[in-house]
Image (cartoon, rainbow, N blue to C red):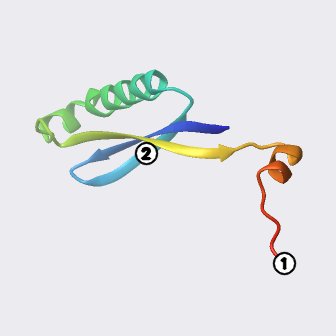
């Protein structure tokens, strides 16, 4: 069985700031919105930031594959 996780990356003007790993897209989106709001809540940061300077990329990553030993042997080919 393949499991997937979502990785959200917060960047400002192409510079990596932080990231997080989440079980669902919704969790990743909520984290991204919270972090972006915190970033621009500083008045000095708000003055020096334009639309498009803060970017969040959310990627889906497949992280695990689980298989039982019986299933592994059943689907294997013996090599001599």
Residue 57 point in image, percent of width and height: 33, 41
At 26% across and 31% down in the image, what residue appears? Answer: 40
In the image, residue 23 above or below residue 18 = above
Q: Nearer the viewer, residue 60 or 26?
A: 60
Instruction: Describe residue 3's horizontal placement relative to residue 40 as left or right.
Output: right
**Which residue carries the number 2 mark?**
18
Q: Nearer the viewer, residue 26 or 46?
A: 26
At 38% across and 48% down in the image, what residue appears? Answer: 17
First of labels 2, 1 by sequence position: 2
Q: Quadrant of residue 77?
A: bottom right
Q: Select label 2 or label 1 by which is in front.
A: 1
Gap in Å between the C-alphas at discs 2 and 1?
50 Å
**Which residue carries the number 1 mark?**
80
Dot 2 surroundings within 10 Å: few (below 14), some, or many (20 or more)?
A: few
Q: Nearer the viewer, residue 67 or 18?
A: 67
Question: At numbered mark 1, what does the secondary structure look like: helix, strand or loop?
Answer: loop
């Amino acid at each position: 069985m393949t499991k997937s996780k979502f990785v959200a990356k917060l960047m400002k003007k192409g510079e990596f700031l932080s990231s997080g790993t989440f079980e669902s897209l919704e969790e990743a989106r909520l984290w991204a919105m919270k972090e972006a709001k915190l970033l621009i809540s500083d008045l000095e940061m708000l003055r020096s930031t334009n639309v498009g300077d803060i970017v969040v990329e959310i990627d889906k990553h497949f992280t695990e594959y689980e298989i039982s030993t019986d299933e592994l042997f059943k689907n294997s080919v013996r090599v001599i």
